[in-house]
């Protein structure tokens, strides 16, 4: 322990050591390994109260669902056990964060709060601003630590790659602390409980009607609801890197194979039961072990892991967009596309949106995907992209109408990736290739035997794959007919987007968007001197201040790295 840590202690008049009392405010970092915020308290030799606030405003938000509530409960249950093994415990309070902190401060004054830097939707952003104001009024320090490569107050995308390199590659994974010093004061258990609320209470806290989701009772199986916790995350990562991952390249495009071929780490990253840095470092270790192996299996492994590593790189690229441009939750990232016209509000729009949400569109693969999501909370990227492009182009539904319904059924809901990807798939960014995924072509390419469709759309089980593929022209018993002509509708929307792209205003706006939010190449100069320039930026806690060919472009897409493939892993 260094001199700086010792100086932070105080000695009472009777000679007993008095430690500063700090709060670890756990949010989307529900783990003890590689957690800079928790580590700061431990390394500083402070007393620590580990606090999770179950906020009614977030539970009642239209983006929150039972999938999220159950994931949080799983993660907190595991976190509590990990803290108890280290001499501490987890305190869970229902209430709004500022009110909880105020009550806690009156019962037990504390010096400071630590948390991770969160890039969330507007509701958590406004919550964080209120917490910052409360901390300032009470002379309480609030330190926020980065847990990924998203940069607060980023002035230029050109400097971000150096910071990414420093934070992710050059910073070692932090071990879990061996011991955490608990606060000495005993709190009122009726207010500051250390018990995990029941599953029913957690689900009731979330906004959705559970009956609409039909969440699977099966847990831990690859085809059921995925359990989210630090213990499971480490097991899932090891399983992927040593067993399942060989199928990754070539397997993640299929809705049938992706349940096992995908890493299944996106939910762990979203809720913070696993750090992105841990994923990078352990992937690199595994690739190092395979380096000298020239067998066919090793070659396939290396191909898959390179592909996975590339997608990890894109994770924070999209979260950075929301961090830098928080208004994109409400308006197009590229201002030239604000004028795009969709179906106006009315009965027809509501009918299409309802059919899309409940898997009753008459398009077999679309309906299978939505019903799968409503039960498992998981779907591979290609199918997610198809759901968005078909809704925006084929059904002419405004992209904003999709944000909350899809957030609810994505168990791995990460606001930065979610909002950025929906805008990109809807064509609102203006700097990417416009891809409109054809549900019919995807059915033929990714589910040629209709196995996925038959599993999730039982009305079609009696029909052959060939008959199902003729859904546009042939009646399929009791299964609903297609609700609209998606080809004609898509042309109307695409014509608007292409007209904007060709316009002078559109081209100028695209240049600005590319400069502010486009990706950059990895830095070529990786010398110690060049890396040291950003070392200080990466280590310090921060405060928040983020004010082809025209036509159906659903060409065959290999598993190339790129922003089109970073929705999930």
Image: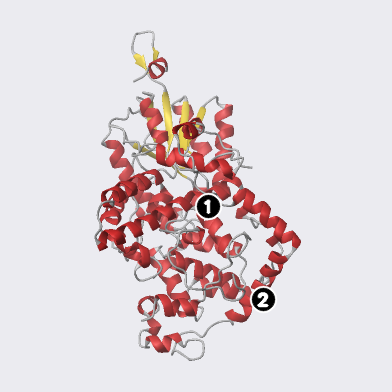
Is the residue marked by circle 1 packed among few (<14), some (14-19), or many (20+) residues within 10 Å? Answer: many
> Which quadrant of the view contains residue 337?
bottom right
Residue 459 visible somewhere in the drawing: yes
Callouts 1 and 2 close, C-beta under 8 Å: no
Left or right: 323 in relation to 443: right
Where's residue 485, x and y in %?
59, 82
The image's colour scheme reads secondary structure
| Rendered residue at 55%/56% (across/down) | 419
Q: Which residue is mark 2?
A: 492
Residue 520 location (% of width, % of height)? 55, 49
State the residue at coordinates (48%, 28%). Answer: 105
Instruction: Give the residue number, with chain letter if any, for mark 1.
Output: 318
- For mark 1, give the secondary structure: helix
User: Is 454 rendered above or below residue 568?
Assistant: below
Image quarter (top left, top right, bottom left or bottom right) of the C terminus: bottom left
Foreground of the two, 271 or 247: 247
- Residue 224 visible within the image: no
């Amino acid at each position: 322990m260094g001199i700086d840590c010792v100086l932070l202690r105080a000695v009472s008049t009777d000679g007993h050591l008095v430690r500063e009392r700090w709060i670890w405010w756990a949010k989307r970092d529900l783990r003890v390994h590689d957690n800079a915020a928790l580590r700061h308290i431990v390394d500083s030799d402070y007393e620590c109260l580990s606090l999770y606030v179950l906020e009614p405003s977030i539970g009642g938000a239209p983006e929150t669902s039972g999938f999220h509530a159950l994931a949080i409960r799983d993660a907190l249950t595991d976190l509590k056990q990990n803290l108890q093994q280290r001499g501490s415990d987890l305190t869970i309070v229902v209430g709004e964060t500022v009110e909880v902190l105020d009550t806690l401060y009156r019962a037990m004054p504390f010096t400071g709060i630590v948390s991770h830097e969160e890039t969330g939707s507007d509701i958590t952003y406004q919550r964080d601003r209120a917490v910052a104001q409360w901390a300032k009024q009470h002379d309480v320090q609030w330190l926020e630590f980065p847990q990924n490569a998203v940069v607060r107050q980023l002035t230029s995308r050109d400097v971000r790659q150096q910071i990414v390199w420093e934070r992710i590659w050059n910073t070692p994974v932090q071990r879990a602390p061996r011991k955490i010093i608990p606060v000495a004061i005993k709190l009122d258990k009726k207010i500051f409980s250390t018990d995990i609320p029941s599953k029913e209470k957690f689900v009731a806290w979330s906004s959705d009607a559970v009956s609409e989701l039909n969440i699977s009772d099966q847990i831990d199986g690859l085809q059921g609801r995925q359990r989210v916790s630090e213990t499971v995350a480490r097991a899932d990562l090891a399983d992927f890197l040593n067993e399942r991952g060989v199928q990754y390249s070539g397997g993640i495009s299929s809705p049938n194979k992706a349940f096992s071929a995908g890493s299944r780490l996106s939910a762990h990253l979203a809720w913070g039961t696993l750090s992105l840095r841990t994923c990078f470092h352990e992937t690199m270790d595994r690739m190092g072990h395979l380096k000298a192996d020239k067998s066919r299996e090793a070659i396939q492994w290396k191909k898959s892991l390179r592909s996975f590593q590339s997608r990890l790189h894109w994770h924070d690229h999209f979260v950075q967009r929301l961090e830098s441009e928080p208004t994109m939750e409400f308006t197009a990232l590229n201002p030239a596309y604000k004028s795009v016209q969709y179906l106006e509000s009315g009965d027809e729009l509501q009918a299409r949106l309802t059919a899309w949400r409940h898997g009753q569109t008459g398009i077999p693969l679309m309906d299978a995907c939505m019903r799968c999501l409503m039960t498992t909370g998981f779907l591979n990227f290609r199918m997610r992209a198809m759901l968005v492009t078909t809704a925006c182009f084929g059904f002419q539904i405004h992209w904003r109408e999709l944000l909350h319904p899809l957030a609810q059924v994505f168990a791995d809901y990460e606001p930065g990736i979610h909002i950025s990807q929906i805008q990109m798939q809807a064509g609102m960014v203006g700097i990417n290739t416009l891809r409109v995924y054809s549900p019919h072509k995807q059915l033929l390419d990714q589910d040629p035997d209709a196995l996925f469709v038959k599993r999730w759309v039982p009305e079609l089980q009696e029909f052959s794959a060939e008959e199902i593929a003729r859904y546009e022209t042939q009646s399929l018993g009791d299964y609903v007919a297609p609700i609209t002509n998606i080809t004609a509708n898509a042309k109307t929307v695409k014509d608007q987007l292409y007209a904007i792209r060709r316009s002078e205003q559109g081209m100028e706006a695209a240049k600005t968007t590319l400069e502010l939010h486009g990706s950059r190449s990895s830095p070529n100069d990786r010398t110690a001197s060049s890396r040291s320039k950003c070392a200080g930026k990466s280590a310090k806690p921060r405060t928040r201040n983020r004010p082809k060919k025209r036509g159906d472009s659903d060409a065959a897409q290999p598993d190339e790295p790129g922003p089109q493939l970073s929705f999930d892993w």
